[in-house]
Amino acid sequence: MTDKEQKISNTFEESALKIERLTFFEGVAMIVGANIGAGILSLAFGARKAGWPVLVFFLILAGAFTTVSMLYVAETTLRTRKPMQLSGLAEKYVGQLGSWLMFSSVAVNSLGCLIAYTNGSGQIISGFLGVSPAVGSLIFFMPAVVVIWMGLRVTGVSEKVITAGMGIMILILIIATVAGPGIKTEHLKFTNWYYAVPVFSLAIFCYISQYLVPELTRGYSAEGGDIHNLPKAIITGMFITGVLLAVVPMAALGMQGPDSVSQVVTLAWGEALGQWAFFTANAFALCAMITSFWAIGETMLTNVVDRLKFPSEWDIKYRIISLILVVVPPFLIAYTGLVTFVGAIYFAGAFAGAIMSVIPVMMINEARKSGDREPEWTCGALAHPIIQGTLIFLFCGAAVYAVLDALEILPHGW
């Protein structure tokens, strides 16, 4: 290969998706912000029959394998010259069926998230302001939609600021819980493995942010960025996520016990600590929902642009169409009463987890054969067939359980 050919092979091309620079911490904040949303608010309720030790076990398991899956996507993007979202990468390396399955996975997972945020934000703002839940959701949607409209760079900066505030609020609440009512160890020692597998589906949902990886690749490959930050940001963001996902249910379950937690954990948790904590806990919940809404909405919008072959994400007409497709359906579904807060999370996590385990494995294997760019980083031994097979078995198994659960053949987790 000549020097000229080498230079071309290491250059990202322009596409319908704009390349905008992200810093390392903005990328980490996007991962944490996407993950710390509806999932963290539902884990205590969803794990109350199985117990906190079962939850921690599955958080570690799901977190480790989801991180591996994200690194598969990262290597695939680094082997691809043209910036694409997951559906575009799947089309390139797996074919049309894989592309539509991937798009469906992103759409279902995003829809499940956004339905949960619509429900949860409406409840919280209704409690704050005395308005109806539907009006509360509309109030929540205003800043949510504005940031998504303004694009990747604004999303990254907003995530960094709000995520830092979330960390401070949750630290205050945990200290107040330990120093005040205290945490009862008997509440945290309780385990019942009979209800374990549904908890795994919830854990999968909390970590599924593979769809963010192409966004991070675009951000770190921009002028002034550092593409070597990509795997570092993924691992750092997922580790911080895991810690937060474990400690919030620990505090809520440890103080209240399994019979007193609410579907949106901060509602009952905040009330138990007092009025100041009620407002602090639910402010945290709103921040968690909006950071996740931003990250998921941004990636869903670019997936719509990529999958439907729109000419540019910044063509005003197509951006409006894409944004409508992202924000209108979850609001309409949320207020039909068809899906509960935790139910939306559970089934979205199970379905999306199955697709997001299989397709990234297929993509990285094919990208290693036919990629059109030399990657700055690779997964190495993490892409071993045994690890890939285990990933597919675990995540597809959780999806099968969810189907059997819906048919009332296996026990429901909550």
Image: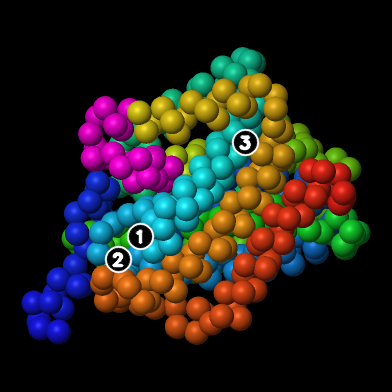
Kindly identify the amino acid type of the residue bearing the numbered disc 2. Answer: Thr
Q: Please tell me whether mark 2 sits on a helix, a strand or a loop.
A: loop
Q: Is 398 rendered above or below residue 43?
A: below
Disc 1 + disc 3, Cβ < 8 Å: no
Distance from label 2 to label 1 (Cα)?
9 Å
Identity of the residue drawn at 44% across and 78% down? 379
Looking at the image, residue 52 sits to the left or right of residue 377; the answer is: right
Which image quarter holds the N terminus? bottom left
In this figure, which residue is indicated by the disc labeled 2? 80
Q: Is 334 rendered above or below residue 226?
A: above
Which image quarter holds the C terminus? top right
**Observer able to see residue 301:** yes
Where is residue 22 drawn, in percent x and y? 30, 56
Most common SS among magenta residues: helix
Kindly identify the amino acid type of the residue bearing the numbered disc 1. Answer: Lys
Where is residue 361 drawn, in percent x and y? 51, 69
Looking at the image, residue 34 sits to the left or right of residue 76; the answer is: right
| Residue numbers of the magenta segment | 299-320
Within-10-Å neighbours for mark 2: few <14, some 14–19, many 20+: many
Where is residue 244 drawn, in percent x and y? 62, 57
Distance from label 1 to label 3 (Cα)?
32 Å
In this figure, which residue is indicated by the disc labeled 3? 116
Q: Could you tell which of marks 2 and 3 lies nearer the N-terminus?
A: 2
In this figure, which residue is indicated by the disc labeled 1? 92
Which of discs 1 and 3 lies nearer the camera? The answer is: 1
Q: Could you tell which of marks 1 and 3 lies nearer the N-terminus?
A: 1
Q: Please tell me whether mark 3 sits on a helix, a strand or a loop.
A: helix
Identity of the residue drawn at 87% across and 49% down? 409
